[in-house]
Image (spheres, coloured by chain):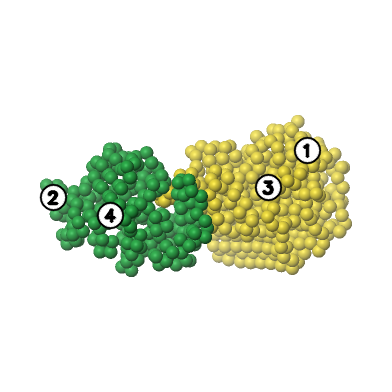
Chain colours: A yellow, B green
Amino acid sequence: MDLKDKLVSSFLAFENGVDANDCIHDIRNEAIKTFENKGFPSKKEEAWKYTSLNAILNHDYSVFSNKEHMVEYKDIKHYFIDDIETFKIVFIDGVYSSHLSQTTHGPMDICLMSAALTKPKYKAVIENYFNKVAVQDSLTSLNTAFTNEGAYIHIPKNKLVEKPIQIVYFSTGNEAATITQPRNLVVVDENSHVQIIERHQSLTDNAVLTNSVTEIFADKRAIVDYYKIQNDNLNASLIDNTFANQHDNSIVSVHTFSFGGKLTRNNLNFFQNGEHIDSILKGITIIKDKQHVDHNTLVHHIEPNCESHQDYKGIFSDRSTGVFNGKVIVEKEAQKTNAFQSNNNILLSDKASINTKPQLEIFADDVKCSHGCTIGQLDESAMFYMRSRGIAEKEAKALLMYAFSNNVLGSVKIKELKNRINNIIATKLGVSIGFDI
Amino acid sequence: MLLIKDLHASVEGKEILKGINLEVNAGEVHAIMGPNGSGKSTLASVIAGKEDYEVEKGDIILDNQNLDELAAEERAHKGIFLSFQYPVEIPGVSVTNFIKTAINETRKAKGLKDMPAKDMLKMIREKAELLEIDRKFLSRSLNEGFSGGEKKRNEIFQMAMLEPKLAILDETDSGLDIDALRIVANGVNKLKSKTNAVVVITHYQRLLDYIVPDFVHVLYNGKIVKSGGKELAHQLEEKGYDWIKQEANA
């Protein structure tokens, strides 16, 4: 039985086994039909032309995780940003781990999707927001059908959440291979500000496939800073589907740091339903071996006077492959739009490759839209300059690559997170020089 | 200190240096002059270890050690510094971070620990003052958007920080106005000592009014065709290079 059939036939058992509001049952039933009709995307689809899921779909994944597995905090401590106070929502094999988490309820809710889907006090928010910005494509529908657990974050208006929120999904690989479908909902009301760090981490070498969906709603003047750390091991694959719905004067930024995993696909979609909105999409990809990272972005400018800024940097070694597919739609009403997109890549090996494709669909006539992509090697004259000052080849290379990605790191607002990413980059580049500036 | 013997070097099969002989001792200032295309910058790059150049024949010896097999960074660790004619822009790396990395990498190569942050800051402050460099300038991206004068001052600032044994200044005067020239030359003069040496590569005599050479060599067509004292530079300023060419071709 292939994975699609297995998932579809498992659905009934799943659906009967979990408790939820009636409306959720309806949404799930609808979603499994959509997935059954569409199946997994294939390379025939334009949006999947350069990314094949075949290699990761042919495992015999277990669809349901068993009991909760205990993990000691000391063993996984280094996956957290632990030098600052944070809220934590932690899952192990898709199951919430209360002893690793630090949540809060009322007036703001930083807690669990499973609770939000069942308890009456969350019903209004769930009905208003759940599955409302997610696009009904096959992978999102698959996630919706199996929605059970994830992070539920609701920040009421006029709240500045001082502690960042860490959402961490661990897989222990207690099954031979596991597929998980985390579902996050982030609702930020007027004038509120929240910072979120999300990470998926496999703790063993078993194959793991994560098909994650995150919905973000930013009301008027809300600020949401979302950071994704993708540094998983080489048997773990991640399909991240993130959707942001923004209202007037809101700012949503998503930074994606892709350093690990076998296959990583980021479907990042922004919908600007208001004026004076800013959407920020940034990413650094540093991969090697046969790793594959695909950034597929969409910014939909619907109303006037909004901005979007996309800046993606990629460094590819060995036989690694990258894709950047950035789509910007500017509707006729969206006059005075400023939409910027840039994608710069360095190929360190002649076996590495990157496919980069900007797609601009502009229907308004008074807009500023720019896009640019570059693919190059390291600047040899800069290399000689640095080496002539005593910086050895490897370190000079690392410093250049660090400099190359620096303006993406520069907009990370949490200092400790920036330090952590600096360290990961230094490790990836195999050097021990400090990059602090 | 530096001994160059019958040095032949080529790039992409074209011979540029055709037998250079030069000896530079500690405490000396040498000027290498010559018309465009005579091989001045090539000589500087070859000494610094640029890999694009092929050394066909001859030796470059620093303190009795042949540099032949040494990479550019290893030569830097041995005390060679090249001030670039066209310093390279490196966006994303600040002047401070770059010089810190360069110093600590050099220390690492010598088996020393990183310079304590306090000492580093103090040194940066002193040397920046010497070259009349503003503190704000130090946090800017290396050479990015710098004026010609700022780039050259920054080169000499790095030289001051790295305290090389042998400094090669490649056309450091080009693109400098008279004030910047004075600051740069003053910096170089203050750094001069009995234990180090400076090789000034220049097309014009102007810089040599400020950095006074002990020896002047004229490079033409890949060879040193004439050597003398500082008066040779004045002669060149007056008469140009044609008489040198005629002598050499005769």
Mark 2 → mark 1, Cα distance in angstroms? 89 Å
Q: Which numbered marker is on residue B28? A: 4
Q: Earlier in the sequence, mark 4 or mark 2?
A: 4
Tag 4 subunit? B
- Residue A365 in view, yes or no: no
From the top left corner, tell me how far across and down residue B92 is, in percent: 50, 56
Q: Residue at x 54, y 52 (%)?
A: A434
Q: Is disc 4 placed on a helix, strand or loop?
A: loop
> Where's residue B72, x and y in %?
39, 45
Q: CA distance from mark 3 to mark 1?
A: 28 Å
> Is disc 2 on the same chain as disc 4?
yes
Please tell me in which quadrant of the rendered image residue A15 appears.
Answer: top right
What residue is disc 3 on? A78
Q: Residue drawn 54% across and 62% down?
A: A368
Q: Residue furthest left?
A: B250
Q: Residues within 10 Å of mark 4 (few under 14, many from 20)?
A: many
Q: CA distance from mark 3 to mark 2?
A: 73 Å
Residue most extreme to the top: A1
Q: Nearer the viewer, residue A301 or A89?
A: A89
- C-alpha separation, residue under disc 4 versus residue under disc 2: 27 Å
Which residue is drawn at the image coordinates 28% and 38% (left, top)? B57
**Secondary element type, mark 1:** loop
